[in-house]
Amino acid sequence: MCPPRVAIYEIVTKSAGAKHVLDILHGFLGISEDRFLHEVKPLWKGSVYFKDWCGYDPFHYTFDFFVQYPDRNAPKAAEQYYYLYDTVSTDPEYRTVSEAMVEDRKSPIYFDSTGHDRYQAVAYHLDLERFNSFLVDVCEERGIEVIDDEITAVDVDDGIVESVRSDAETYCGDLYVDASGFNRVIKGELEPAFREFELPVDSAYTAKIERPLSEAVPATVVESGEAGWFWQIDTFDFRDVGYVFSSEFTPDDRAASELITHCDGAISQSDLTKYEFTSGYHTEAWEGNCVAIGNAEGFVEPLQSTALTANIQAAANLSIVLSSHGRVEPSGARDLYNAWVQRLWESIYDFISIHYRYAAGNSPFWQAAQSVPLSRRVERLEEHFDRCGYNTKIQPGTPLSGEETLEELAVFAPINFFIVMRNMGVESTLYEENSFDLPDDMKREIDEFYNSMETKAEQLLTIEEVYRGILQIASQ
């Protein structure tokens, strides 16, 4: 029998509403951004750049797409929404700062009269080995014991984890967090229920390419292939490339050949690593005294790079639920957390599904992908967009098209869906059957507003200027 062992970790919530990775790392967890840049050497991500998605014009899905004509409460709201529909979505003259950052290969760092500052609407591309090593150091500095051991057995009694064992040690606790990825070392012993999503891809090849820092692109670059899609993610040292595909529509050797050809021969067969996955999640993330987080809890194919944001939100929300319930485990706290996690995964599926539903590819894979099922939530958003166009004021609980209210989407708001739908050619009856003439003063204000965005973008330093100039860090 194990002696009782209780570890209490208190997290000071500096930003209880933190939602984004940078907010949680540098606000919620209080990690110095300057130290993070020196030790982890992240590259910034300004957008998911759809360079070629089934032949659609290139477009960015940015973190600042909500930057729009600033006076949302002006009387001519209809004209403002028309401007969103017909100008921002289709006119490359208007760029947000994040779009300019990607296209001009800049960092979000700039200097003004007050000194060093950073544009906020970005995320990170991280080297996981360096990131994990950094987190271990931070834990040790904060008095959190880090044990490097391999779990080889899990003792479960009536749905409760009694202990976990390695070859040399037995570990007991009150609450077990399974973050063991697809191995699901603890969660897998509980025989949990799993909801599988009907998404069309199930495999991926990945590789790394050496590349000078001057050629780094601060975006996740996405292009469609014959039976799936390619990604490009630049980190400080390398360019990670991959091909996410359907094993039903293409054999492994053809998929590998597609990726090699896509990379213009910069990689070979020996550079490739193969992965297989199932998209879905365990319907009870917190089961008994075990909470699964990350890939141990669920996984949705990597389009739109939702995993890191979702997982770090889940960890932060778990700490909030635990601390707000006196560090005990009432069933109500468990139910509250599980309901949030379910909304999180369903929201991610809803958002990913529209990228396939509105695809325009003609290969057998892409024709089949367009039949991906939409949830009733997305169908209502689709109906609303057709009748009412853009509406940036839709919030959870807002009636849509006279039907039941929209449930909380956990991660993605209606405007997130509308931006992708519009860039994939979805039209709206509101705009197609009505004529909107923007007043001259509004046109001037729009021009002035985006001119100010360009001015801010011009101030941004290049990635090389930040790392090799200010931080004096050279590639390894």
Image (tube, rainbow, N blue to C red):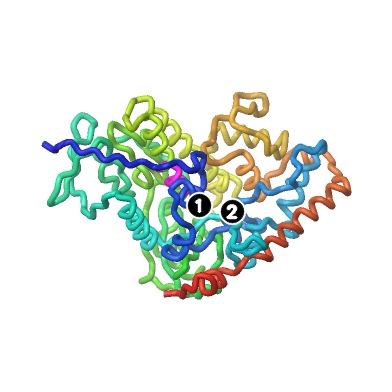
Residue lying furthest front: 114
- In the image, taking residue 208 as reference, residue 19 lies left or right, namely right
What secondary structure is marked by label 1? helix
Amino acid bearing label 1: Leu
Q: Is residue 457 visible?
A: yes
What secondary structure is marked by label 2? loop
Vertical placement of 285 versus 89: above or below?
above
Q: Is most of the magenta stretch helix, strand or loop?
A: helix
The image's mark for residue 111 is: none
The image's mark for residue 120 is: 2
Residue lying furthest left: 1
Q: Is residue 371 visible?
A: no
Residue at 58% over, 36% down? 378
Vertical placement of 195 versus 403: above or below?
below
Quadrant assignment, res 460: bottom right
Quadrant assignment, res 158: top left
Tell which of 74 and 152 is nearer to you: 74
- In the image, taking residue 312 as reference, residue 97 lies left or right, namely right
x, y percent for residue 6: 24, 38
Tell which of 261 and 417 is nearer to you: 417
x, y percent for residue 319: 39, 39
Task: State the residue position of label 1.
Answer: 22
- In the image, taking residue 53 as reference, residue 444 lies left or right, namely right
Residue at 33% over, 38% down? 291
Indicate the quadrant containing the C terminus: top left, top right, bottom left or bottom right.
Answer: bottom left
Amino acid bearing label 2: Gln
Tell which of 417 and 170 is nearer to you: 170
User: Which residues lie in the magenta part?
Assistant: 309-315
| Residue density around tag 2, few if under 14, some if 14–19, many if 20 or more, within 10 Å | some
Residue at 85% over, 46% down? 438
Residue lying furthest right: 440
